[in-house]
């Protein structure tokens, strides 16, 4: 196990069999070792600096019906909302004032948010804040739409593939969605020139070690600039309400594997990890993550963007809680970096 970890550190790749061995046999002692190696790699590229992104959850209306997601179309118990352009711009202003130089617009796949409206929104933000990075996370769109958003000034796009296994994908999503289209989107985004993020939920229902190996190999092929991984967490109003959460240890192991395979990638310590355990955010950073995404959405709306139960959105997860985040990072020897934090080749 030790020699596998050392080789992954040195060569940034392992065979499928070796990845399987690592995923199955990594005990607490070796988890500590791989986390340490991953941390050293992140340190060698980013020092003790953690990039921050201001997350604006622009709406929870969604035409999709993903079985795991709390804002899925069939959930009648969600109070739906949609932020208007002025509100989004004032969130950006607040973020800019606080020092954020990346904003992330995330939301459900909302029919009201036509491509034209997204272009108009992105252009307005770009005009008001020429120096910030604009990241979108609005789901699957046409090639033309991605192109238009890019031209309007968007720089990055987050779209987790969720799982690279066809049968597993279909067990997590309704028939109206396909892995093929998800992957088409990701290849489009890369081709257009976005800094592209993909990733998975760790411990999603039905996920096996084989699936994880497939995910790691897919990410190795795609070479995304950003990798988002967090534990699956159940939401009480979904078909997966009584499924168990993803495990902290497995999430930290995967995070470290991705850091060792993709030394310069931008890897967030996710809100889901911070929700799973009070020290989740810090543990993610100590396993090789180098990004956190505090919530910049209006406080009145945050509880409505409930992808899973007990989702953290206040305190150090909130943009207005930057001081608290600073303290928590300081306690583990890290500082906030407020620059754009682009991917660097
Ligand atoms: N609609 C966009 C999309 O599909 O990428 C962005 C919003 S979507 C809610 C953002 C991410 O939330 C998904 O990619 C998924 O990985 C994550 N998510 C949804 N439900 C979750 C759950 N129950 N546990 C953990 N993560 C979840």
Image: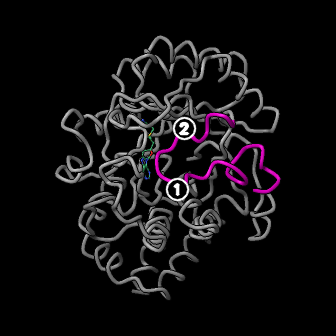
Pointer 1 residue: 272
Residue pictured at 42% horizontal, 44% vertical: 70
Residue pictured at 47% horizontal, 45% vertical: 307
Quarter-wise, where is residue 290 in the image? Answer: bottom right
| Of residues 89 and 313, the one drawn nearer to the viewer in this rendering | 313
- Crowd class of label 1 (few under 14; some 14 to 19; many from 20; radius 10 Å): many
Secondary structure of residue under mark 2: loop
Residue pictured at 74% horizontal, 71% vertical: 332
Q: Which disc number belongs to residue 304?
A: 2
Kindly report the distance in space between the C-alpha atoms of the residues bearing marks 2 and 1.
16 Å
Secondary structure of residue under mark 1: helix
Segment tinted magenta in the rendering: 299-325
Quarter-wise, where is residue 8 in the image? Answer: bottom left
Whether disc 2's CB lies below 8 Å from ligand 1 is answered no
Q: Which disc number belongs to residue 205?
A: none
Position of 59 compared to 77: left or right? right
């Amino acid at each position: 196990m030790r020699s596998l970890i050392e080789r992954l550190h040195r060569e940034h790749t392992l065979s499928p069999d070796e990845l399987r061995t690592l995923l199955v046999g990594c005990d607490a002692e070796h988890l500590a070792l791989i986390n340490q190696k991953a941390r050293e790699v992140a340190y060698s590229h980013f020092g003790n600096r953690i990039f921050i992104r201001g997350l604006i959850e622009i709406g929870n209306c969604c035409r999709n019906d993903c079985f795991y997601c709390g804002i899925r179309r069939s959930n009648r118990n969600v109070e739906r909302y949609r932020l208007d352009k002025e509100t989004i711009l004032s969130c950006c202003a607040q973020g800019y004032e606080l020092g954020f130089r990346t904003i992330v617009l995330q939301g459900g796949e909302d029919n009201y948010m036509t491509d034209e409206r997204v272009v108009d929104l992105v252009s307005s933000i770009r005009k008001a804040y020429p120096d910030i990075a604009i990241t979108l996370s609005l789901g699957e769109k046409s090639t033309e739409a991605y192109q238009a958003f890019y031209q309007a000034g968007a720089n990055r796009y987050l779209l987790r593939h969720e799982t690279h296994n066809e049968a597993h994908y279909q067990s997590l999503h309704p028939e109206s969605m396909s892995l093929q289209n998800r992957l088409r989107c990701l290849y489009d985004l890369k081709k257009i020139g976005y800094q592209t993020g993909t990733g998975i939920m760790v411990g999603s229902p039905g996920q096996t070690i084989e699936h994880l190996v497939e995910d790691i190999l897919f990410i190795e092929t795609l070479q995304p600039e950003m990798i988002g991984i967090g534990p699956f967490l159940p939401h009480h109003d979904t078909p997966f309400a009584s499924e168990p959460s993803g495990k902290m240890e497995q999430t930290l192991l995967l995070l470290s594997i991705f850091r060792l395979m993709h030394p310069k990638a931008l890897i967030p310590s996710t809100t889901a990890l911070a929700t799973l355990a009070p020290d989740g955010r810090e543990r993610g950073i100590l396993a090789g993550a180098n990004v956190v995404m505090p919530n910049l959405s209006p406080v009145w709306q945050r509880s409505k963007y409930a992808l899973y139960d007990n989702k953290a959105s206040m305190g150090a997860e909130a943009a207005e809680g930057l001081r608290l985040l600073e303290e928590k990072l300081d306690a583990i020897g890290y500082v906030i970096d407020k620059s754009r934090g682009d991917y660097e080749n």
